[in-house]
Image (tube, helix red, strand yellow):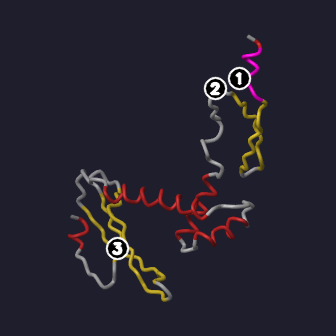
């Protein structure tokens, strides 16, 4: 029936996405009974991975989530919410936890322990903190990062505790 077909269709809506080389506009059909999901862009993804990496790098450098808005505006993005920045940081935290809790089930005959020192803000003062890096060379000659973590200067843990 022509009337039933007409009732289930609506006028299309234009979706605009900002990409590195400009803007892309697509017509999105509106169907009453059928949900629409574009195959071109990820669902609810309005920011490209390069921009997400810039946000994440700013966050890792100690820029507050509110100040990241000013940094991103210089890249041409109108608004990024602090909660969006926090969600990107939480995603990174979960990936780090997966890395740190993964089982090491291959034989690693050579282990190297090193530390890099960074100035870290604690309240209103800065202190030197060590980033402990434990890497190993597997029996097939491939390097395997075993542990990365902040080493508190007041707490001296032995390397056997970290690699256990």
Quadrant in which the C terminus appears:
bottom left
Above or below for 14 versus 78: above
- Residue toward you, 12 or 155: 12
Q: Position of residue 13 (x, y in %)?
A: 76, 37
Front disc: 1 or 3: 1
N-terminal of the pair, mark 2 or mark 3, is 2
Q: Which residue is mark 2?
A: 33
- Residue toward you, 151 or 37: 37
Above or below for 139 versus 55: above
Front disc: 2 or 3: 2
Badge 2 vs badge 3, beta-carbon distance below 8 Å: no
Taking 17 as reference, is 54 left or right?
A: left
Q: Mark 2 and mark 1: span between their CA atoms?
A: 7 Å
Badge 1 vs badge 3, beta-carbon distance below 8 Å: no
Q: Which residue is mark 3?
A: 114
The residue drawn where x is 74% and y is 41% is 15
């Amino acid at each position: 029936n022509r009337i039933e077909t007409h009732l289930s269709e609506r006028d299309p809506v234009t979706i605009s996405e900002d990409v590195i080389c400009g803007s892309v506009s697509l017509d999105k059909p509106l169907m009453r009974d059928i949900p629409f999901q574009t195959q071109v862009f990820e669902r609810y993804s309005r920011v490209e991975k390069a921009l997400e990496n810039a946000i994440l790098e700013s966050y890792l450098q100690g820029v507050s989530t509110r100040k990241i808005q000013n940094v991103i505006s210089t890249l041409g993005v109108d608004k990024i919410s602090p909660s969006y920045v926090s969600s990107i940081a939480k995603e990174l935290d979960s990936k780090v936890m997966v890395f740190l809790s993964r089982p090491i089930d291959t034989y690693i005959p050579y282990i190297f322990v090193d530390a890099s020192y960074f100035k870290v803000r604690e309240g209103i003062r800065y202190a030197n903190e060590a980033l402990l890096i434990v890497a190993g060379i597997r029996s097939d000659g491939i390097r395997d990062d075993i542990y990365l973590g902040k080493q508190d200067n007041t707490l001296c843990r032995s390397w056997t505790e970290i690699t256990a």
